[in-house]
Image: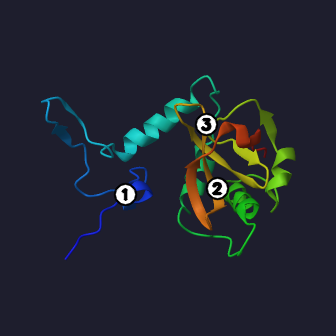
């Protein structure tokens, strides 16, 4: 009997349901005797602290943790019930559930929504050609990490190339 191994997104430590029970702050010695953390052993608090540290970097300080938290609640689902073209509808749902005015069901409408900002900030809406989502962090290369709907037919969190983003907007009231 073979046991399935968790790899890639299945082992993503940002989501407690995907974390392996034995992956809590383990320290291993490699064959050279050096000690270090095993890949994937960071805690959820570490991941959140890292994402928050990026929001206070050169990319700006205003954050909207409420948008990110609300969007992350739906990872792995489709809360809109739509079969296609639903990233804008998902963004609209997240905005309304966090007390903001909605931006509509079309991704392109978000280019005219809220207040434009010059770069990625946690809580900003990332507008792309045909896609939209909320910035949850910034990777080491300055690329935004975005939670969005209709990413491979589900809500997902993924790094997008910064060249793909046409606008960043902070939600209005």
N-term mark: 1 or 2 = 1
Mark 3, secondary structure of its residue = loop
N-term mark: 2 or 3 = 3
Where does the image place residue 73, in percent across and percent down from the top left?
54, 60
Answer above or below: position of 49 versus 92.
above
Q: Residues within 10 Å of mark 3 (few under 14, many from 20)?
A: some
Q: Which residue is most to the top?
A: 58
The residue indicated by pointer 1 is: 7
The reply to whether the C-beta atoms of the residues labelled 1 and 2 are less than 8 Å apart is no
Answer above or below: position of 129 versus 79.
above
Residue that appears at 26% across and 42% down: 38
Quarter in which the N terminus is drawn: bottom left
Numbered badge on residue 28: none
Q: Residues within 10 Å of mark 1 (few under 14, many from 20)?
A: few
Where does the image place residue 27, in percent across and percent down from the top left?
19, 39
Where does the image place residue 11, in percent across and percent down from the top left?
37, 56
Residue that appears at 59% across and 62% down: 155
Q: Residues within 10 Å of mark 2 (few under 14, many from 20)?
A: many
Give the left or right position of residue 89, taking residue 72 as reference. right
Answer above or below: position of 80 versus 135.
below
Where does the image place residue 154, in percent across and percent down from the top left?
60, 66
Residue that appears at 29% across and 68% down: 4
Residue that appears at 67% across and 37% down: 162
Answer above or below: position of 92 versus 14.
below
Residue at mark 2 to residue at mark 3: CA–CA distance: 15 Å
The residue indicated by pointer 2 is: 148
* Residue 118 quadrant: top right
Tell me the mark number nearer the camera, choosing from 2 and 3.
3
The residue indicated by pointer 3 is: 143
């Amino acid at each position: 009997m073979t046991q399935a191994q968790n790899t890639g997104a299945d082992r993503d430590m940002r989501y407690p349901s995907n974390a392996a029970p034995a992956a809590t702050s383990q320290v291993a010695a490699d064959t050279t005797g050096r000690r270090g953390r095993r890949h994937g052993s960071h805690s959820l608090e570490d991941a959140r602290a890292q994402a928050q540290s990026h929001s206070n970097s050169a990319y700006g300080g205003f954050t909207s943790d409420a948008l990110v938290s609300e969007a992350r609640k739906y990872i792995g689902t489709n809360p809109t019930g739509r079969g296609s073209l639903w990233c804008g509808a998902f963004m609209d749902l997240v905005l309304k559930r966090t007390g903001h005015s909605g931006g509509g069901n079309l991704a392109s409408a978000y280019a005219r929504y809220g207040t434009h900002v010059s770069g990625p900030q946690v809580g900003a809406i990332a507008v792309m050609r045909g896609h939209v989502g909320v910035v949850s962090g910034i990777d080491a290369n300055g690329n935004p990490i975005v939670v969005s709907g209709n990413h491979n037919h589900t809500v997902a969190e993924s790094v997008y190339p910064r060249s793909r983003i046409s606008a960043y907007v902070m939600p209005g009231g």
